[in-house]
Amino acid sequence: MGVPPPLELLTFPSVTSTVDPSGRKSLAEEAQARIDEEILIRYLPICTLRTQRNALSPISRLPDELFAAVFVHNAQECYSSSKRRTWPPPSVPSWVNVSYVCNHWRTVALDCPTLWTYLFFVSRPWMAELLTRSKMAPLCVQLDLSFPNTSLQKWEMLFPHLPRVKELHIRSLSCVTASQLISRLTIPTPLLQSLHLSRRHGPCSTAVLDGTPSVLPVILSGMTPSLRSLELSKLDIAWHALALSAVTNLKLRDMPSPPTMDSLASILAQMPELRELELEHTLRWDPSLSRGALDLVPDKVTLPRLSRLVIVAPTSAAVRFLSHVHIPASTQTRLKCSYQGRPSIFHLLPYSTKRIDSGEDGNQVSPPTGVLRSLNIEGCPPLRVHFTCGTSEDGYKYSSFSIPEASSNKRSNHDWDCAIPLKMDLDRDSESLPLSEIVVGDVCRDLSLTHLQSLAVGIIGSFNFSETFWKEIFTLAQGLRFVKLKYTTSLRGLVTALAPNHHEHGKGGDSRFVALALASIELEQVSFTSACGARTQGDSNNCQPTVGCLCDALTRRKAVGLSLGMIAIHESDNVAVQEVQELRRVVCQVTWDEIDRAQEATGEWDAEF
């Protein structure tokens, strides 16, 4: 058998013996190029044959059902994202592109009615096409009337298909469009599972809606047996006729004419399956509260399956509501109440703090799982104070129920599915007394701090908790191991509570030490003073804490066997290298980011001038 031409070329005597090395390399490259061409000529037909063969093999080909599932998932993602869209929807749904890739994909797409059931009111031709292609599959519909050139005209195309609507979400209704819409919602919708209606912001008379008390209940009274989620915002309806026995999710926001407590209790009594309840600016303010009268409320409404509760209302209104309903102790609760004085707080606390298991059963060998283990106190006294209660040690890391940002997609921070049974935000109204240290102490006393292990305090401004406050906290939470301070402009109360005579170096141990279990301290964006005259004078009562003052306090604690295991200092003012070195001789582990905000600010000022 002869040698193949390329190999014959390389082994030909004249090539190996007479051509210089550079010439041999050029001939080799030419031979390789010819071989590559031969391979390509033979390879492409093989690929074609393999493709034809794989197309006939059910194992190597994706089933049409899987293709359809992928297409539907893509459509669901586009539909869900449109709920958060801040720009008008496109005239053509983006997911229809899958029907233009190839004949096979188009066949799969057109044979899948579910793919065409996600409607957010695109162009009229496409609305008609989507309704046709969806055949008799359940529809998901959403319409945002806040965009320009968006009206209810396309809604007319949908009315004949209402019996197969599964989800109906309409936002930014005006009074006129709301009246037009509600007047047409008389067709039975046996498949409807989710109904969300909201009116746009701005002044508007509610007479149009109040004048038709029998319209909306027609669609909701017995004609929607599948309804599970109902959200209404800025809309008045005839509450007395509602029949919502299967509803599991109810959200009412900014009701122009809130229902009376008796009416609301009657409505909730029809919802034994209710799992999530949100009442935002829906409860009526009650100027008179009596502890005895609240305890004597007859026939409280029981919501045995309620797992999540959100209330945004004046304190008195929240108290009135909570006194009329009985909810499980395991219900995760988020409260945002306007503070109206200490009496209202005293009325609110028994209903709110029972979300936390006291864990005071003397027969228990170990702490129960539902006890309070972490507490986050933040805000800006005397205007607002927020409490976040956790049943895990790291629950203090979660932020308050209220989010400072005004962005609409960040209305609030619920932190559901976390070990946070209670978030309670107290905001002072214009006529109330300031939210003081006394009020914060009232809340802490009502909470059971027996098993508290982590405490975070983030106070903005010049407000400072006193030594008395800290001592009471450490007395109530004798197992407290971790304390974090953030934003505070004064550490005097904490430092003095840790070691009352921390500047009196000549004295021995002090029997009044508290925080016996304290092992870690974290300080973030706090303000130490640059100098403390009381330190040189041995006057602990007038201390203006520097890092050195804190070191004195920790030194005295170490002398009586109360050593601190760790301290971390981040982005704080007036922290010097020498003081940190002094801390390292007292504390086992010291973490410092070497950032001194005071020095940075001075450096920036000098650089500008």
Image: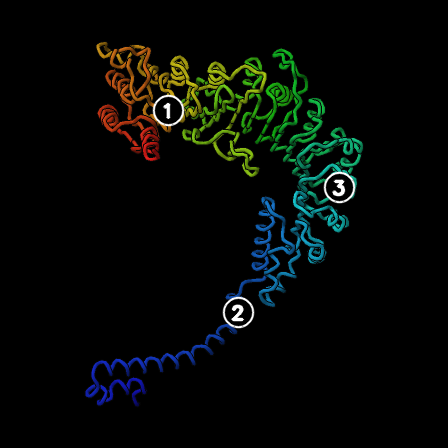
User: Could you tell which of marks 1 and 2 lies nearer the N-terminus?
Assistant: 2
Q: Residues within 10 Å of mark 2 (few under 14, many from 20)?
A: few
Residue at 44%, 23% (x, y): give it. Answer: 461
Q: Residues within 10 Å of mark 1 (few under 14, many from 20)?
A: many
Q: Residues within 10 Å of mark 3 (few under 14, many from 20)?
A: some
Amino acid tagged 3:
Leu
Q: Which residue is mark 1?
A: 483
Which one is closest to the eye, mark 1 or mark 3?
3
Measured Cα–Cα span from mark 1 to mark 3 = 55 Å
Quarter of the image that includes the C terminus: top left
Q: Quadrant of residue 188?
A: top right
Give residue 88's position: percent from left, percent from top.
Answer: 63, 48
- Could you say which disc has been placed on residue 25 in the image? none
User: Could you tell which of marks 2 and 3 lies nearer the N-terminus?
Assistant: 2
Work out whether residue 273 or residue 128 is closer to the camera in this orientation and state it.
128
Q: Which residue is mark 2?
A: 57
Measured Cα–Cα span from mark 2 to mark 3 = 53 Å
Mark 2 falls on what kind of element?
A: loop
Amino acid tagged 2:
Ser
Residue at 31%, 85% (x, y): give it. Answer: 6
Q: Is residue 146 above or below residue 268?
A: below
Amino acid tagged 1:
Val
Mark 3 falls on what kind of element?
A: helix
Measured Cα–Cα span from mark 1 to mark 2 = 65 Å
Give residue 403's position: percent from left, percent from top.
Answer: 52, 32
Q: Which residue is mark 3?
A: 181
